[in-house]
Amino acid sequence: MEEILPDKKLDIKSLICPYTFVKAKLAIEVMEIGQVLEILLDYEEASRSIPKSMEDHGQTVLKIEKINDTDWILLIRKDKD
Amino acid sequence: MDFTEEQMMRYSRHIILPEVGGKGQAKIAKAKVFIVGAGGLGCPVGYYLTAAGVGTIGIIDNDTVELSNLQRQIAHNVNTIGMAKVESAKKTFGALNPDVNIVAIQDRISKDNIMDLIKDYDIVVDGSDNFPTRYLINDACVMAGKPLVSGAILRFEGQVTTMMPKDGPCYRCLFEEPPPAGLVPSCQEAGVLGVITGIVGGLQATEVLKLILGKGDLLKGELLIYDALKTTFRKVKVPKNPACPVCGENPTITELIDYSSGDYCTT
């Protein structure tokens, strides 16, 4: 599968809800349509809630991956302003 | 706008709303709102708009805080009795959110100062307690082209409406002239359940934020009437009057009028 290169990377490790989503939303708001945001997080609940909220807001979730014992990486494509 | 960590936390419940987001919060932070009255309505309107992070809040009132105000005027307290209401409110609002620039004006609003006072603000909120002021604010907002969020309370009832310049009716389309002083309830008849001011002020603050955000339907061309005893909200359509003396096609009122307030009870 082709590797997707993010246009922006956001590290929200150590943050918990709702700041995980607040930071992610603020980051994606200032991006262009079609750009991809990579989010690195270590709060398990956010690995489910951020993708769900992003989809509710009209964005597309490209990847949810647990990369080690503590961390997840999400790839979100901005589809809606 | 770049939010500090503190602002990100403070406004997080706004930012996560799809209708607000960081962009909406930035609009709120840039907005300038002028509130007439630091009493029953001005207190909750100013308090919530301060909490919301409105950039600049101007507030005018000539009175000082009295013990009888504290049953409903929630920005004041026993330690600010005797203080100018606007200073008392500024203290309370400032303690809630230091991001907000509070401009406190201890003065009586009149035909001579109103245009200058409102000129730098985006939205005007009427929290006044008497008809002469209500008509003065309406006429000034029509002439200055400022949106006006109007509220009124009496006994167990409250009313709210939003008037947009050149788009829908103004207060004079609804009631052309102030009522004769004899028909206005006297002080001893004019009781109010204190909490009604919070309901109506909360509705006014909501209208202000929707105006700033450009989201939702405003109470434009509609008067919302809240009856606390029956627990009902009614909306009454208010048509624009083409012959309105101030916002109609051929206005006869082209200068501001100070109706005598001496005949009215204003407490």
Image (cartoon, rainbow, N blue to C red):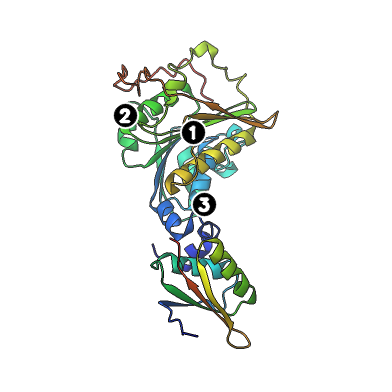
Q: Residues within 10 Å of mark 3 (few under 14, many from 20)?
A: some
- Give the structural element (helix, strand or loop) at label 3: helix
Q: Which residue is mark 1?
A: B127
> Is residue A26 in view?
yes
- Give the structural element (helix, strand or loop) at label 1: loop
- Residue at left offset 70%, top offset 28%: B229
Same chain assignment for discs 1 and 2? yes
Q: Please tell me which of labels 1 and 3 falls first in the chain.
A: 3
- Residue at left offset 43%, top offset 81%: A5
Q: Which residue is mark 3?
A: B51
- Give the structural element (helix, strand or loop) at label 2: helix
Locate residue B98 relative to residue A68 in the image: left or right. left
Q: Please tell me which of labels 1 and 2 falls first in the chain.
A: 1
Q: Where residue B177 sits in the image (x, y, percent)?
A: 43, 16
Q: Please tell me which of labels 3 and 2 falls first in the chain.
A: 3
- Residue at left offset 57%, top offset 35%: B200
Q: Which residue is mark 2?
A: B143
| Residue B165 occupies quadrant | top left
Q: Where residue A10 sits in the image (x, y, percent)?
A: 47, 76
Locate residue B266 relative to residue B231 in the image: left or right. left
